[in-house]
Every structure is written in C-alpha cells, then in structure tokens.
Image (cartoon, grey):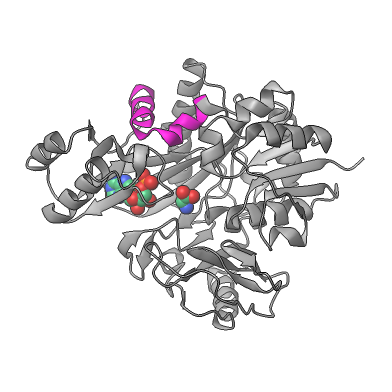
Amino acid sequence: MSRRVLVVGSGGREHAIIRQLAISEQKPILFCLPGNPGTAQSATNVDLDMMDFDAVVSFCKSEAIDLVIIGPEDPLIKGMGDNLHKEGINVFGPGAMGARLEGDKEFSKEVLASAGVPTARYQAFSSSHAALKHLDTVTLPVVIKACGAAQGKGVAVCSNREEAEVFIRSCLDDQQFGGAGLRILMEECLFGPELSVLIVTDGQDYCLLAPSRDHKRIGEGDVGPNTGGMGAFAPVNLDPEMYGEIDTRIVLPVLAELRRRDIPYCGVLYVGLMLTESGPQVLEFNTRFGDPETQVVLPLLRVDFLEMCYSTATGRLSDFLQGIHEVDEVMPNNWPGAGASSWLRKAVVVVGASDGYPGQYIKGRPIELPQCNGDDCWVIHAGTTLDDGGKLVTDGGRVLGAVGSGLTLSLAKESAYKMLDSTHFEGLIYRRDIGISGEK
Ligand code: AMP
Ligand code: GLY
C-alpha cells in the first residue's frame, strides 16, 4: 500500500520536498499543510492552521498518515514533533529540545562551546544600556543577533557604530522582533565563504547531503540587508581535506554533544558555516531543511528521498545507509553518506522576490510563469497564492525560485536565468550573481 505522507509548511522548501517525494518509485500519497499552488500540483493541500497541533494530530489519525515531515522552524520550536511522537506518529523533525538549537542562539553557543566546536566569540545582553557600553570595546564590523527565531531577519552585520546602535535599540527597546529579540548576542565578525551543511540523522547514525551555498544578502555582490536567502547552488566544490575537517571538527562533536546531553534528535540539522582562514566555524544551526538550499540539494539525491526520511523517522537510518552504493568517481570519500548525492550534476536556484523585500512589499500581483518546466529547469512556488478568480498572484517577499540543473554550474545557471527572464510580475527582483563564487 502506498505510504501517506504529510509535509507541514507552505514555502519554497515545502514545494521542493513535495516535488522530491512525488518522484519516489513508491508512489506515495502526499498532503501539504497548508501548502501553496506549487505543492497542489502533486499533493492535496490541507487547509488547517499548522500551529494548532491538536488539529494536526487529528488530521494525521483520520488520514492514517505514515510520516510527517515538518518544514518550518516555528512548529518545531513550539514542539509539534513531540505532540506527533507522543501519539505514535512517525515524524521527521526534532522535538522542542532539539529545535532549541535554532530557537535559542545563546543555547546553541553553549552547546558549541561544550562540544569544543569553533564559533565566533560573543557576549549576550538583555539591556540596551549594557549592550551599548560593550559596543565601545569591540572591533567593527560586529554582528548582532536576536537570540530567538526571527524569520532570518534577526541578524545584522554592522560595519559602523550607528548601525549597531540602531539594531540593538530595535531589538531591546523597540521590540521589533517581539520576544525573539529581548535577548541579543554581540558577536565577532568572521570572514570567508559560507557553506550550508545538512545532516540527516536519527540520533544514532547520520548522512551528509551535498554541501550548498546560500546568498543571504538582498543585493548583488553581497550588499544590503540579510534576507531568508536569495539563491543557492550545490554541490559546492571544497578542497579535498575540507570535507573531512567539517566532519571531524564540526559534525561528529556536535552530534556527540547532543547525545551526551540526552537531546533526542531525529530529522535534519542544518549547520551554517563560515570557511575562515583558520578553518570552518559555525555561524548558526537550523533544525530543519534550509530555504532555498533544499531546492538545490534534494534534486541531486540519487537515493529515494521518501525512504531516507521514513528510515530516519523510524530510527532505521543505518539500514538505509547500508543500501547506498557509492559509485560516483568524483565524490569525496571523507563525507559520510556522500553516495546519497550525485556529485556530477550541479543545481542552482535563483529566487524571484517582490520589490521592497526584506522590508515592506506589495502582495496580490498577477504572476506569469515561464514555459520551461522539464528535467533541467522548473519553478518552485514560495510566496504565491490563487486569487478569488483562481489566478496566480504574489503572496510573499520571496515569491518563487527558478531551479536549473546541469552537468556544469554554467549550464545550470543558464537554465535558471532563462526561466526568470520569462517570468513576469510587477516588482519582480532577483540577483544576477547567484553561483558566481562557485565557478570552479
Ligand atoms: P545566522 O542566522 O546566525 O546564520 O546569520 C545569518 C547570516 O548572517 C549568516 O548566514 C552570515 O551571512 C551572517 N553572519 C552571522 N554570524 C556572523 C558572524 N559571526 N560573522 C560574519 N557574518 C555572520
Ligand atoms: N537559507 C537559510 C535558512 O534556511 O535559514
């Protein structure tokens, strides 16, 4: 009998997850809660409030759901995983204890310190007076972060004192991020290329997906404010010894520290790294798939994604890993689970956003999608919806992602940009330089 899978969320990440599940040979029956017009192409969208956990549990029971994959951080941090688990429902995604790694940046720093994993030096503050006083003693640029989850907008890399002061006051005095910004970290600024590493783990075994690179700033050349992510590509070519270094200096100690603290972790742990001159350092944890990284990492999988998630959720990841036959000549041999991904192909996603994002933007603008939808290019819906007349319109800051894939990064980029050039909606903006730093 076909497995029945529920994906929670409504963004580009969830459309990418649904798309990957839909190509499984197991032909699963898919639901997305609440989903978007993209997920509706292969799944039944479920009109429920995802934060109403009782309603989600009831839905899973009445629809005999075999597996729930939780996309966004909010339900994870609030304990949706625990609620489902308690009811005997298989869930891919950590409970509240594990999700604290994303929901509380000060806690994640403590975990990193006790694991002996390199990360930027920091101090935490709850009062703007103390924070501003400390600001006098730091070297600029300095990074200021809201401790709680703030939709990717709670971090400012401040090159001068004025910017830092404004951000500190907006968190601690004006409460721009609500409770998420009532405590802040003031962090040493690190330099180097960034890397997103997705660890799939059932708490015992783990598998690393292809490393990817997000482009977080709104502007070309990495200028302007941080966003949720304006584009990404994978795999990122690293120096051969770097793969092993990431595994031994970062991944292994972090997973060991979680076990030492009895923090159960089942799902994906996203580690955001800065590859500094003195080695990789951790910038952040997310306790879910990255957005837009998922849009490029999943299409590179050579294994059945549904089986990967199901084995993880049922604590049998080791059985699944034994079934991976590592045959790609170019894959790194010191990247556990490397055989799960193709290293011969490249994938690029370029995000089409609404003018004004990450600040204010207008919703409800009609969207004209490109024709190209095939094996080497496709559109991932993020902030889209249908209006009363059933027409596709914009409904968010990051509206869609154009994904291109090919044997080289240039071919993948060409496909993605060709699609964006024939995508139309009023106020469409996108970065022209996604993937430039990955040309090798
Ligand atoms: P986070 O949500 O903590 O990853 O921060 C979002 C983005 O801010 C990262 O992807 C980096 O681009 C930047 N960032 C965070 N921490 C630092 C740091 N210590 N040094 C330099 N840039 C940082
Ligand atoms: N792309 C960064 C994130 O998912 O938080």
- Relative horizontal placement of residue 174, taking residue 391 as reference (left or right): left
Image quadrant holding the N terminus, namely top right
- Residue plotted at (57% across, 50% down): 210
- Relative horizontal placement of residue 70, taking residue 132 as reference (left or right): right
Q: Where residue 118 sits in the image (x, y, percent)?
A: 33, 34
Given residues 156 and 201, the one toward you in this image is 156
- Residue plotted at (48% across, 69% down): 353
- Relative horizontal placement of residue 4, taking residue 213 as reference (left or right): right
Farthest bottom residue? 422
Q: Does the magenta stretch include residue 206?
A: no
Q: Is residue 428 above or below residue 102?
A: below
Badge count? 0
- Magenta span: predominant SS is helix
Extent of the magenta region: 97-115
- Relative horizontal placement of residue 218, taking residue 95 as reference (left or right): left
Q: Is residue 237 visible?
A: no
Q: Quadrant of residue 377?
A: bottom right
Q: Does the magenta stretch include residue 104?
A: yes
Farthest right residue? 1
Q: Is residue 63 visible?
A: yes
Q: Quadrant of residue 368?
A: bottom right
Q: Where residue 167 sits in the image (x, y, percent)?
A: 23, 50
Q: Where residue 185 sits in the image (x, y, percent)?
A: 26, 37
Given residues 355 and 325, the one toward you in this image is 355
Q: Quadrant of residue 409?
A: bottom right
Q: Is residue 367 above or below residue 386?
A: below
Q: In this view, does 418 lie above or below 323?
A: below
Q: Where residue 144 sits in the image (x, y, percent)?
A: 25, 45
